[in-house]
Amino acid sequence: MDSNKTEIRRAFIINFVYFILIAGVVLFVLRNLLPMFAPFLIGFVVASLLTPLIRSITSRWKISRSLISIVCLLLCYAVIFVIIWFFGSRFINVVQEQATRLPEYYNRFLEPELLKLSDKILASFPDSRQTIEELLNSLESSMQDAIRSVSGMIISLGASWIVGFPGFLIQLIFTIISSFFFTLDYDTVINFVLRQFKPAKQEMLVEIVTSARTVIWKILRVYALLMTITFFELYAGFTLFKIPMAPLLAFCVAIVDILPVLGTGTILIPWGIILLILGNTSLGIGILLLYVLITAVRQFLEPKIIGSQVGLHPIVTLLCIFAGAQLIGVIGIFAFPVIATIIKKMNDEGTIHVIH
């Protein structure tokens, strides 16, 4: 009996150490090597996602695989470029323009209202005039510093994006080129990789690639659903606030919802603050409350929907999203749930055993 307990403990310790070592290696690769090979990894993922569609078209209409690969990739990247260029560039220009005018808005609109409020407070408490004046001066100074800080931060973000654009463009070119070659010779690449392993391992690798492709498509559908929900929330809010061009504006803001952490806050928070500075208090508060509502709904639904689609418990999904964002950023938000789902699926099917 004691020997059995000893063997169980020994097996648990070995498995635990093995898991920690594997996790350490994976984390090292993700944090240090992933940025270096990101264009090629993204290119392979794009090729893997498009390959079933390309196979279906070539087998049905007997068209050249090269031609279909080029057309599918061009359409895929064209849609992405149009969205980024049309909405992203306009958004950055508007935000930067308004950010540079924040101090002016403060001086013209908010400061006079604060002076009126200060006079009313001082008139109501004449015995504590000196103390109240010191508090009001401190508050005014803090608000001015906050306005300058927010304005400078927004402008610097736009400037850093412009400075980093050449590097982004180079990575984008390599991503497009690699995705084309991976798409064109997808079967050749997969067969080459498989030949480096024994037959028993080949089946497991095919299962990993197939599972990853399925999970990625499911996660893409989930985020499309979440962005659709966000669009209707924004449309309802903008219509309620009687904001012009509510459908188009809601669509533009919903596109930004894919961003981690802030999401729609990258637009709604500055917008709400600017409205408050301009003196439109009710609309400013309404926009900020709309952001709070959208964020609450998103945080509640995201782990549940992703979990239901990929087969993970909402807590595990939330943990994967949080850990991925903390460890490797934006890519981790998508990569960690995919990795966890593949491990769970293979463990359930007996292909691997996380704990013996």
Image (cartoon, grey):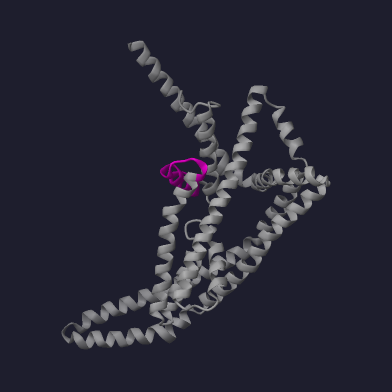
Provide residue 299's location: percent of width, then percent of height: 43, 55
Q: Which residues are magenta?
A: 309-326
Classify residue 45 as left or right of residue 127.
right
Classify residue 273 as left or right of residue 114.
right
Against 242, residue 40 (above or below) is: above
Q: Quick check: can you spot residue 259?
A: no
Q: Quadrant of the N terminus?
A: top left
Provide residue 265's location: percent of width, then percent of height: 47, 65
* Residue at the image position 64 percent from the left and 45 percent from the top: 36
**Count of numbered tags:** 0
Magenta: predominant secondary structure element?
A: helix
Against 10, residue 299 (above or below) is: below
* Residue at the image position 42 percent from the left and 79 percent from the top: 277
* Rendering quarter of residue 202: top right
Q: Nearer the viewer, residue 118 or 273?
A: 273
* Rendering quarter of residue 91: bottom right
Against 55, residue 286 (above or below) is: below
Q: In the image, is residue 313 part of the stretch drawn in magenta?
A: yes
* Residue at the image position 79 percent from the left and 49 percent from the top: 68
Provide residue 129's location: percent of width, then percent of height: 21, 84
Provide residue 219's location: percent of width, then percent of height: 55, 48
Q: Quick check: can you spot residue 104?
A: yes
Classify residue 18 as left or right of residue 70.
left
View extreme (front): residue: 60
* Rendering quarter of residue 194: top right
* Residue at the image position 64 percent from the left and 22 percent from the top: 200
Against 186, residue 131 (above or below) is: below
